[in-house]
Image (spheres, rainbow, N blue to C red):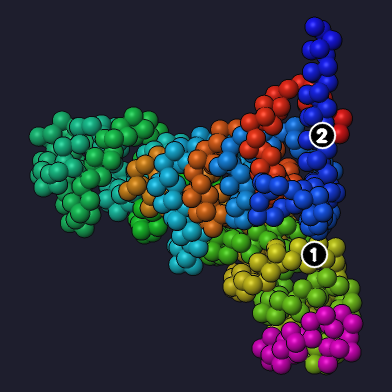
Amino acid sequence: MNARVSNNSKIVVAGAAVIVAAVAAYGLGRVYPPQGASISGTIAPAERYQVSQVSTGDVVLGDTTVPSLMQTDAFELMVKDKSFRALATNPAFMALAQENPKALAAIAQNPAAFAALAKDPKAFAALAGDAKAYASLSAAAQASNAQVFAAMVANSAAFQTMARQPQALAAMAAHANAVAALAAYPQALQAIAANAQAFRMFANDPKGFAAAAGNPASFAAMSTDAKAFQALAGDPKAMAAISGDAQMFAALAANAQAFRTLASDAAFSSAATAKALAAMAANASAFRMATDAQALQAMVASAAAVQAQMAASGVGAQAAAAQAAANASAALAANSVAFAAMAQQPQAMAAMADHAVAFAALSRYPQAFQAMAADPKAFANFSKDVNAFAMAASTPQAFQGMAVAPASFRALANDAKAMAALRADSQVFASLAANALAFQSLATNAQAFLAMSADSKAFDAMAANAQAFRQMSANAQGLASMALRAQAFQSAAAAASQASALAANASAANATGAQALQLMAAYPQAFALMAQQPQAFLALTADAKAMSALASNVQAISALANSRAFASLASSAAFAALLSNQQFAAQVGAN
C-alpha cells in the first residue's frame, strides 16, 4: 500500500515537473505549444511546433526566471483569478508597472484607499477622470499657488502657529475674507475662537451678530471684550465681509476644540497673525481651494523651511528686501518643476543663479544648451571671445561640440538679444566649465534637463530677482533645498485643490487619500483603464505581496499573461491545485 502511495506521489511530482519544464521553456524562449487562436481539439504532430519561438527579446527576465516567478504570490493570483489576468494584459497597467514599479509599491503601502475605490467602480472611474484634471493643473492655478506660497513664506511664523491646529487652519482658509475681517480686531477674534459654539447661532443671522456687536453688554460672550466688538461693529467694510460669509461661524463651531486651543496661544492674537490672515484674504480664492487640512499643514511646513533657508542666506533680513524675498519665493513655486530639476545638481543651480540672464538666453535654445552642458570644457575658451562663439555657432558643423545640435546653435547665433546677453556676461562659459561634472550630470538626465530648459520663465525669474538668488546661491545646498520644498508645496497645494473639488462626490472623497490621488494623477490613463477592471484591482490591492511580486516581475508576467497557451494551462483546476503541493514547489525550485 505504501509503495503504491509512493508511486502515485512520484507520478504527481513527475507530472508537475513536466508542467514546470513546459512553462519555463516558454519563458526562456524555448519550445512551447503554439499561441494560436485555439489549442483545443486534435493536435497534428506535424503542425505542433510550426510557430516561431518566443525569443529572449520577447521575454526579458533579467535575473528572474519563470520558475522563480511561479513561486510568487502574483503568479498564484494570476493563475486563480481571471480578472487579474485581464488586468495583467492591460497595456496601460503594464506601462505603469514597467515605467515606475515604485508606484505599485506605494499602492501596496496604501491598499485601503484603492480597495475602497475598487469596491465602488463609479467612484473609481470618476476619480480617475478627476485625476486627469489634477495632472494638467493649469498655469493659472500654479501661479495662484505661488502667491499663496509667497504669503506663507513672508508670514511663516504665524502660519506655523495656525498649522498646529490644521483643522482650524483649513476652516479659516475656507472663510478667509470673513476671518481676516475679524483678525483686524484681534481681541474679538480671540473671544469668538475661545467660545465658538456660543457664536454658532449667528451663522443664519448675520444681522443679529451686528446688533449684538453694537451692544456687546447684551451678549455674555462679547461683554468681556466690549470695546473690540464695538469697534468691529463700527467698521462697515469688516461687517460686510462677515455678513457676506456668515457660515464662518458654523465652521468655527464645527472645529470648536481646535479654535479653543488656538485662542489660548498668545501668538494667535498677535499682529503677525492678523497680517497672515490678511495675506490669506488677499489670495482668498486660492486658499478656498486648498482646504484639505493635512495638505495645508504640509504647505505651511514647506514654506517655513524655505523661509528659514532664506533667513540663513540673508534674504529678506531688511524691510527693503522683503519684497524681493517674496518675489523670489513666488518664483520658486511658480516654476517649481524647473527649479526642482536644477536642484538635482546644486552646484549647477548656483552657477545658473549667478549668471541668470545669460542662462535665460541659453534656455531658449534647449538643444544647444544641452550640448554645452554635456561638454562644458569645450566651450570654456569662449569666455574670452564671445564673437568667436557667435562665428562658430553660425557654422556649427565646424565645431565638434556644436555639431550635435546645429539648427539650435544657428538659431542662437541669429538671436541678437540672446547674443547680447552672452556678451554682457561672457563668464557664463567659464562657469559652465568650472562646474563641468554638475552640468554633465544634468545633461545626461534628458527628462530633467528638458523640464528645466523648457521653462525659460524660471531663468527670467532668477534674472528679475538676481540679488535674492545670488544671496541664496551662496549656499548651493540651501538653494536646492528651497527648490525641492517649493515643488513639494505645489504638489500639496494641487492635492488640496483636487480634494476640495472632489468634496461634492462624497463616495469618491471618502474612498481615497492624497497618496492615491497623486498616484492616479501621475498615471491618469492607466488608472482610467484600471477603473474598467475594478474586481481585478480589488484582488491586487488585497494582496500586497502579489503587488510587490508583480512590480519586480513585470515583463515576465506580461509575457505569460499574453500567452493563450498559458491562459489555458492556468485555467486548469488541476494546475491550480498543484500550486499548493509542497513537492510541486520543490520541483519548481529545482528547475
Q: Quadrant of the N terminus?
A: top right
Q: Is residue 531 left or right of residue 289?
A: right
Q: Is residue 400 magenta?
A: yes
Distance CA(mark 2)–CA(mark 1): 48 Å
Name the mark on residue 230: none
Crowding near the residue tagged with mark 1, few <14, some 14–19, many ≥20 C-alpha atoms within 10 Å:
few
Q: Residue at x 50, y 63 (%)?
A: 136
Q: Secondary structure at mark 1?
A: helix
- What is the three-letter code of the residue carrying label 1? Thr
Residue 241 in sight in this render: yes
Q: Which residue is mark 2?
A: 18
Find residue 484 and report its image quarter: bottom right
Measured from the top left, where is residue 24 in percent x and y?
Answer: 81, 41
Measured from the top left, where is residue 171 in percent x and y?
Answer: 34, 43
Magenta highlight range = 395-420
Q: Quadrant of the C terminus?
A: top right
Q: Residue at x 34, y 43 (%)?
A: 506
Q: Secondary structure at mark 2?
A: helix
- What is the three-letter code of the residue carrying label 2? Val
Crowding near the residue tagged with mark 2, few <14, some 14–19, many ≥20 C-alpha atoms within 10 Å:
few
Measured from the top left, where is residue 64 in percent x and y?
Answer: 81, 42
Determine whether label 2 and label 1 are within 8 Å by CB. no
Q: Residue at x 13, y 34 (%)?
A: 219
Q: Is residue 297 magenta?
A: no
Measured from the top left, where is residue 197 in percent x and y?
Answer: 23, 32
Q: Is residue 343 left or right of residue 109?
A: right
From the viewer's side, name the closer residue of 287 and 544: 544
The majority secondary structure of the magenta stretch comes to helix
Q: Residue at x 71, y 28 (%)?
A: 579
Mark 2 or mark 1: name the one nearer the start of the chain.
Answer: 2
Q: Which residue is mark 1?
A: 444
Please determine whether, in this image, residue 104 is positioned above or below residue 57. Answer: above
